[in-house]
């Protein structure tokens, strides 16, 4: 009988593993293809959102709505005079700060001022006991009287000696000695007069008056104390505050334009604002420029003088200074909110007549509050987007709605749009291109508003 060999157990294993290995390979390829396809779609989406090289990164969202117009607010480009200013932080510095010190020693008998009051030059401030100096004056006057009598006696003797000398009755030497004696008495009289003048001066020093017009501070010494001329604290400090100055610094690069204007005889106006740079405090004139540049900071100090009649500027107060250097007349200006920043610099979205927008690169100039001068890239009469620019791209359809309802909808979707050089409020008030209280746009798009009044960016297609 023939025996049959048992089946090889490895055979079925080989048959079952071959198909499993091929299935895993297929799954891996499918995953790779899926990732590649997803990457391609993402790249296409990114490319579609950045067709304009100047558009911001958020511009791609404008294509999500297909041909639906995006609701925006716009403003008209106008011409206006734009001041060229230099802004700096300054400190209010009095023109004179005087520490009232006594020039003699003695007891402080009387104080003639109230802390914080305004005084004029020559007003009485304090009185020191002058009785010791009155006694010194009397002593000097008595000595002068004595020396005067001696001088008169010597002069009389000299006259008599000269007569006797002419008669050859006395020696010539005696006459000469008498002349010297008269001169000595005259010198003694002069010394006595000097002592009198010194005593009177000390008495005058006992009566202390203000050397300048200004405000007195807190008194440093109370009545009854003994004061000396060696004291460093003084009696009180008087500060001149009308007029008053503000010292501030500007970069050395800005110095040439300031000096050019000053050499031309122009009076440069300086305006002081509070620490928050919001409230205008006072207006003055540039008075002086320092003689050298601070090498550690690269700045130079300037001094502006303010009348300060209302005493709104206080010594050592920090203020923001705006120095008017020049004025650009007839400049092209746009609201700060219209200016965007891209890889190629500043740009704006210009609203076209066909209700589309175009990206326009611009060169900006001086900033004046909520508006900016445009040196190149725009012309008067054009319209630029001031709200809703973050949803736009080159050629995007727009719906200009400058009324309050559209503004609220725009603010709800995108928030307040902020320009690169400034900001504006929800109603756009504060600049020349803002809508008026009736909701009418100054940009001249009334016809488009009327034509598309029944459309909304969420429910209606763009007008063809």
Image (cartoon, rainbow, N blue to C red):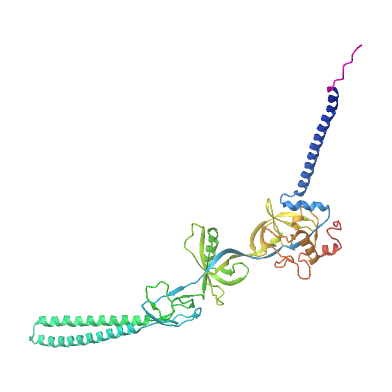
Which of the image's four quarters has the N terminus?
top right
Q: Is residue 428 left or right of residue 167?
A: right
Image position of 84 with respect to 103: above or below: above
- Residue reaching furthest left? 169
- Residue reaching furthest front? 1
Residue 396 visible in the displayed image = yes
Residue at image point 79% right, 43% down: 41
Q: In the depicted view, which residue is nearer to us: 11 or 309?
A: 11
User: Can you give x and y, in whole percent of width and height, for residue 69 in the image?
Assistant: 82, 57
User: Can you give x and y, in whole percent of width and height, for residue 352 in the image?
Assistant: 78, 57
Number of dots carrying numbers: 0
Is residue 391 shown in magenta? no
Image position of 285 with respect to 39: above or below: below
User: Can you give x and y, in whole percent of width and height, for residue 137 in the image?
Assistant: 30, 84
* Magenta-highlighted residues: 1-10
Residue 445 visible in the displayed image = no
User: Can you give x and y, in whole percent of width and height, for residue 65 in the image?
Assistant: 82, 53
Q: Is residue 312 left or right of residue 406?
A: left
- Residue reaching furthest right? 1
Q: Quadrant of residue 150?
A: bottom left
Q: Is residue 169 left or right of residue 107?
A: left
Which of the image's four quarters has the C terminus?
bottom right
Image position of 338 with respect to 312: above or below: above
Is residue 4 shown in magenta? yes
| Secondary structure that dominates the magenta span | loop
Q: Is residue 342 left or right of residue 274?
A: right
């Amino acid at each position: 009988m023939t025996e049959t060999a048992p089946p090889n157990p490895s055979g079925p294993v080989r048959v079952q593993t071959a198909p499993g290995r091929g299935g895993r390979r297929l799954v891996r390829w499918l995953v790779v293809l899926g990732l590649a396809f997803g990457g391609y779609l993402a790249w296409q989406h990114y490319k579609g959102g950045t067709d304009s090289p100047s558009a911001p990164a958020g511009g791609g969202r404008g294509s999500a709505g297909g041909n639906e117009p995006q609701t925006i607010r716009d403003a008209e480009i106008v011409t206006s005079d734009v001041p060229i200013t230099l802004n700096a932080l300054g400190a209010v510095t009095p023109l004179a700060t005087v520490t009232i010190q006594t020039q003699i020693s003695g007891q402080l008998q009387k104080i003639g001022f109230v802390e914080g009051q305004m005084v004029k030059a020559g007003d009485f401030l304090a009185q020191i006991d002058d009785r010791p100096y009155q006694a010194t004056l009397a002593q000097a006057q008595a000595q002068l009287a004595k020396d005067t009598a001696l001088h008169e006696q010597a002069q009389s003797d000299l006259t008599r000696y000269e007569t006797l000398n002419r008669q050859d009755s006395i020696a010539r030497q005696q006459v000469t000695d008498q002349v010297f004696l008269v001169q000595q008495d005259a010198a003694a009289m002069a010394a006595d007069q000097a002592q009198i003048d010194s005593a009177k001066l000390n008495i005058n020093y006992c009566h202390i008056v203000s050397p300048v017009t200004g405000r007195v501070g807190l008194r440093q010494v109370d009545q009854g104390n003994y004061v000396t001329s060696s004291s460093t604290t003084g009696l009180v400090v008087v500060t001149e505050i009308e007029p008053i100055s503000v010292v501030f610094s500007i970069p050395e690069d800005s110095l040439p334009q300031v000096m050019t204007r000053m050499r031309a005889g122009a009076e440069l106006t300086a305006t002081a604002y509070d620490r928050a740079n919001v409230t205008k405090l006072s207006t003055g004139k540039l008075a002086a420029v320092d003689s050298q540049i601070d090498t550690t900071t690269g700045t130079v100090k300037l001094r502006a003088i303010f009348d300060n009649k209302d005493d709104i500027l206080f010594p050592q107060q920090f203020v923001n200074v705006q120095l008017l250097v020049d004025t650009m007349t007839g400049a092209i200006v746009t609201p700060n909110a219209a200016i965007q920043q891209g890889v190629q610099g500043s740009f704006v979205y210009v609203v076209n007549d066909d209700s589309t927008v175009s990206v326009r690169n611009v060169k900006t100039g001086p900033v004046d509050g909520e508006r900016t001068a445009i040196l190149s890239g725009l012309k008067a009469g054009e319209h630029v987007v001031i709200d809703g620019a973050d949803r736009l791209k080159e050629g995007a359809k727009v719906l200009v709605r400058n009324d309050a309802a559209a503004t609220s909808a725009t603010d709800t979707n995108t928030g307040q749009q902020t320009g690169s050089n400034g900001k504006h409020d929800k109603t756009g008030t504060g600049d020349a291109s803002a809508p008026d209280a009736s909701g009418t746009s100054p940009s001249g798009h009334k016809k488009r508003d009327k034509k598309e009044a029944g459309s909304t960016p969420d429910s209606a297609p763009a007008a063809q």
